[in-house]
Amino acid sequence: MENSKDKVLEIINKTLEDNKAENVTVIDLQGKTSIADYMVVASGTSQRHVASLAEKVYENLKAAGFPVSMEGEEKADWVLIDAFDVIVHIFKPEVREFYNIEKMWQSVANSRKS
């Protein structure tokens, strides 16, 4: 049987791909932090695209029966979707570049490897 976090990640990736998200990055955080096992970072081309991507990810996870919450959709410069084992950040490109969270989290993911 497929692991639920793998199914969540599959739904997120398929939804982002189907809806033309840009620069999708998946960071494996398993064993590195307690906040999540994976972090997905993606960009939308505009506030409307970011909001649409976030809404579709949220709806698809809910429809599949996974607990999920979302914040930031009102402004839609940066939307955070918390699917517990997987956290998704969807940004406008300039906001993503400013915060550069994947650089910080990549260093966490790459640290403490034996």
Image: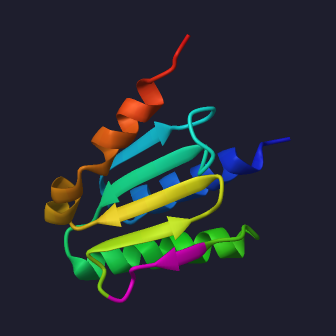
Residue range (magenta):
69-74
Residue 49 location in percent, x, y? Answer: 29, 75
Q: Residue furthest right?
A: 1
x and y percent of residue 90 in the render?
36, 64
Q: Is residue 58 above or below residue 106?
A: below
Quadrant location of the N terminus in the rendered image: top right
- Residue found at x 67% / y 75%: 62
Query: Where the C terminus falls, by quadrant?
Result: top right
Q: How many marks?
A: 0
Q: Where is residue 84 in the image (x, y as percent from the top left)?
A: 65, 59
Say which quarter of the image contains residue 107. top left
Return the residue found at the far bottom: 74
Q: Which colour scheme is used?
A: rainbow
Q: Is residue 85 found left or right of 113 in the rendered image? A: right
Horizontal placement of 102 versus 28: left or right? Answer: left
In the drawing, does residue 94 fall left or right of residue 17? left
Front residue (pair 95, 50): 95
Residue at the spot 20% in from the left edge and 75% down from the top edge:
46
Residue 3 placement (x, y as % from top left): 77, 43
Q: Is residue 59 magenta?
A: no
* Residue drawn at point x = 38 percent, y = 66 percent: 19
User: Where 29 falls versus 99 (above or below)?
Assistant: above
Residue closer to the observer: 98 or 23: 98
Q: Which of 5 and 15 is in front in this view?
A: 5
Vertical comparison of 51 with 17: above or below: below
- 97 left or right, relative to 31: left
The structure residue drawn at horizontal position 29% and vertical position 86%, both measured from the top left corner, is: 75
